[in-house]
Amino acid sequence: MAAELKKKTTKKIKLFINNREVETKPDSTIIQAADSLGIFIPRMCYFPGLTPPGSCRICQVEIKGMNKLELACKTQIKEGMEIFTDTDKVLKAQKSVLELLLIDHPLDCPICDQAGECILHDYFMKIGLYKSRFIENKVQKPKVQDYGKYIVYDGERCILCTRCIRFLDEVSKTSELALVERGNKTYISIFPGKKIDNPYSLNVTEICPVGALTSKDFRFKCRVWFLQSTPSICPGCSRGCNIFIDHFKNEAYRYRARPNMKVNKHWLCDDGRMTFKIIKDENRITSPMMKKDGKLNKISLQKAYKTIVDKFKALNKKDTKKIYGLASPFASNEDNYLFVKFMREIVGTENIDYRISDYSGFSDDILICKDHTPNSNGAENMGAIPGKEGKSFADLISPDNDSRIKILYVMDHDLLKIMGKEQFEIFFSRIDTLILQSSYPNSTVEYADIFLPTTLWAESSGTFTNGFKRIQEFSKALEPVGETKTHWEHFIELSKPLGKTFKFKTSREITREIAKNVKGYLRLSEGKIAERGVLVKK
Amino acid sequence: MNSGKKDKMEKVLLKNIDKPNSYNIETYMSSGGYKAIEKALKEYSPDQIIDIVKKSNLRGRGGAGFPTGVKWSFMPKKSDKPKYLICNADEGEPGTFKDRILLELDPHMLIEGMIISAFAIGARYSFIYIRGEFMLGGKRCETAIQEAKEKGFLGENILESGFNHEIYVHYGAGAYICGEETSLMNSLEGKRGYPRIRPPFPAAYGVFGNPTTVNNVETLANVPHIIEKGVDWYLSIGPEKNNGPKLLSVSGPVKKPGVYEVPMGIPLRKVIFDLCGGMLSGKILKAIIPGGSSTPMLTMDDLDVHMDFDSLAKAGSMLGSGGVIVIDDSFCIVRAVKILTDFYKHESCGQCTPCREGLGWLKRIMDRIENGEGREEDLDLLLDICKDIEGHTICPLADAAIPPIRSSIEKFRDEYLYHIREKECMI
Amino acid sequence: MEFEFSEKGKAEIERLIEIYPSKEAVIIPALHIGQNENGWVSNEVCMTISELLDIPAAKIEGVASFYTMFSRKPKGKYWLMVCKNISCSIMGSEHIINYLEQLLRIKVGETTKDQLFTLDVVECLGSCGTAPVMMINDKYYENLNEPKIEQIINELREKG
């Protein structure tokens, strides 16, 4: 029956595009069908996920049996339809729309951020290439308008595609923008005093096909043709929105949304977009540190590893019950897997937990999830919870627990910040050795005996499992800074002298082992992890 | 067919306007008003009325000339949602001022026509969408609606027929585009007057998403007469397929400009030189725009054309809204076309690229030519731009801007060339 | 300074909210009432309508700025709108406009210092048979010539 149902939902219809017979799923418009088949139809006002207004007129196509050209964004496909996207009539109509949009377009290109990803440039090179015949004075409209925390608007560059308005009406449902005036005096405006300040504002700068809406954060920072794009996952919350990190010379400049209909559709939230700022945060510690005489000193990685190994070797078997490992919902599955393996198989303790603090925050029914960590589910699935004989973190810090802690090995958590100075110092007084291994700036480092500097997600590859149990891969975009290494690289280094060498050279190798050993993660053994991620199998 | 049949046609549409207090219900009823509604509701079914109107060949008087009975038959017979009739009283086509007369001086004729039409299409509610500037007309309609209600012609169970109906007056706020039926509906809904893409058509999805028919004031005013006097009477006026009385608005340097009720098919020459008394002294006829500014210009050579849909179409123009604009030879054609191009550009709603940008471009070229900065290639450029935008827009406003330019370049090219070569006006 | 509708205005808007199937449809009637009471459609008028009808303020501004009859600038007590379209032009509207500019000592688009008159040109008013035509507030003045205009202006000046 399942096979039958599958067949029903994927029944395709046959039609002809440019005399070529194609098959595609019904219930779509011509432009959606063309997109799914990789056939080019120019568009300006159409954007997937938003209601098409049919106002730019550039997506006109010829349909056999119809006199006038029809809009690809508004016309539903039918069985046997014969569509033409490249006849003379169609090309002339496209050229004409382009020409009309360019007549009043300002020659801002040398200072416009959109250059390099501008739809007018791209289309001119593809379907324009005509000599201009416009000699009139251009219409003037408001420029460099401050429309919000992140948004600048230029009315002269605006082609009135209204993608931004429709986004704010239909997705963020905040409606800060509207068309004002009439005819070719029309431009897009906020109501005086009511700026765009919703959590999704930057999407409008991304979907704007020209330089009308630009991001204050990215303006004038880098020409887009220098940027390299690496697919990754936003670490801001457990939604795990798919992103591209755009970077140049080992510096990240911005994110762009990577469309994934199962996770974030075409959008990202503003806070998520700004998570790349942490990579260059001046409070990141990129050298190993060790406390001596109450002061923190920089030491070599070799020394740091040796010191940690010695601390472990100094303990005897019955002490293992007093060793605690705090795994990280900020770190990848590979990081957590290897930590759990290290703590269980090498150190021999079952006191592992990733649930250290309530990292929850603002959430809504659009993208932002309550859990503001990227990998809580992954940490749990990797086994970062106490074993039968193990104690949880909640037990550990319960008010009537004053037992000694021989070694507390912490990944990422800023315990000082979480518990507050008073409470933390009480807790800290029970700890013999505090080992801290953090990617993020961490104020607890003042109290750490040893600190190992760790890479952020953008500086390594790995997988996160989001709040909806989808395992998603992120790729390394930037080179690690200073002496930072991934969490899992640290554990490999520590494993060697402690008797059981972990033999992993790449994160992919760890992923393969996870696929073999972790329940529900079997699909990660496939050649290439699906671009859209895979669900944890029940 | 011969239009000479009913040259001396007895006034039907304008029969009351010269009476004192013509807009009062007493005046209307004392001259036989509200008899047709009784006949319609008591003797006919809605479908029968649609049939009668179809047979009469009544064609839309707003400008498009679409057969009214056919438009009514697009409405669904049964509908979960309430059906609407909208009277398009957004008269904005330059040269046209006939609806204003009816609204101000005989609103009851319109209301009677609306009630019968609403009955035919099964509409529960009607709106009179009246342009905001016609404040007096609007107020007269509001009063007339109240009077009609008091006499039982509106409200519940009208004349014991089981038919319920309400009419509301809604004022526009100054936008020619709102005369286009889908723009009108958006405006009524409180939005910017942007026309809608069709499909869906108003009969399927109209105002507030309900099945809607939009008819012009004059069209609706014809309906009571068709019911009362019958199809045969209506067909006896005008040539084949172009029947009934027509209101022509004549403006320009003629002795007696104004609104004239004529039989369809009356020769243009008769209108100007007979009814209107000819040109003002010293003025020589140069050009005529026969059906409102969106219709191609005619010259002295076309004076014998008959004023009906088909004859004018054959002559290369249109009856449109019947707004006859007379231009004399002391008025520069280039200036006339610049004024009209300004108008269309100013009234473009701005929704779609070809109209918004195209009309803006056309306007600036016309300005340049008028100011003596034109070039010879500008004429071909104008025609080219017209070709580029024609038929590619959401609504016909851009198409309407083209005839003045195209027909004037064709028929008065010498005036343009003079502007371009001599850098000043020929006049 | 905020704008509040008069009791009468508010009552009318309430009445309209009952009639129309959607609150949005009351925007244009409310803007008419607001302009009548406030003299022009200011930001405050837009805000008040936005709150009354529960529609984002930007959309209200979008509607107000689309229609010619709504002014987004302060207007004089008497808003003169002279038609400049084809029939009126043929019948001499240019002279009328020039004459008014001289008489009122302002240019088209401006308001007299005493805030009494604003002079604007508009498109076809639908009264071409009695060209040249102008509208002052909600009244039509037709078959204009210089003496008539002078009389009209004087009468309005006396009224104040």
Image (cartoon, coloured by chain):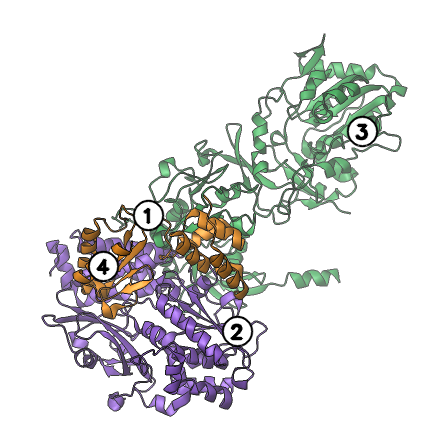
The secondary structure type at the circle numbered 2 is strand
Q: Which mark is residue A393?
A: 3
| Chain-order first, disc 3 or disc 1 | 1
Q: Nearer the viewer, residue A411 or A309?
A: A411
Q: Nearer the viewer, mark 4 or mark 2?
A: 2
Q: Quadrant of residue B90?
A: bottom left
Which chain appears purple? B
Q: Is disc 1 in the same subunit as disc 4?
A: no
Q: Residue under label 4, please give it.
A: B338
Amino acid at dot 3:
Phe
Q: Provide the chain ID for the residue under circle 2.
A: B
Q: Is disc 4 in the same subunit as disc 2?
A: yes
Q: Which mark is residue B83?
A: 2
Q: Residue under label 1, please give it.
A: A104
Q: Provide the chain ID for the residue under circle 3.
A: A
Viewer can see residue B89: no
Q: Colour of chain C?
A: orange
Which chain appears green? A
Amino acid at dot 1:
Asp
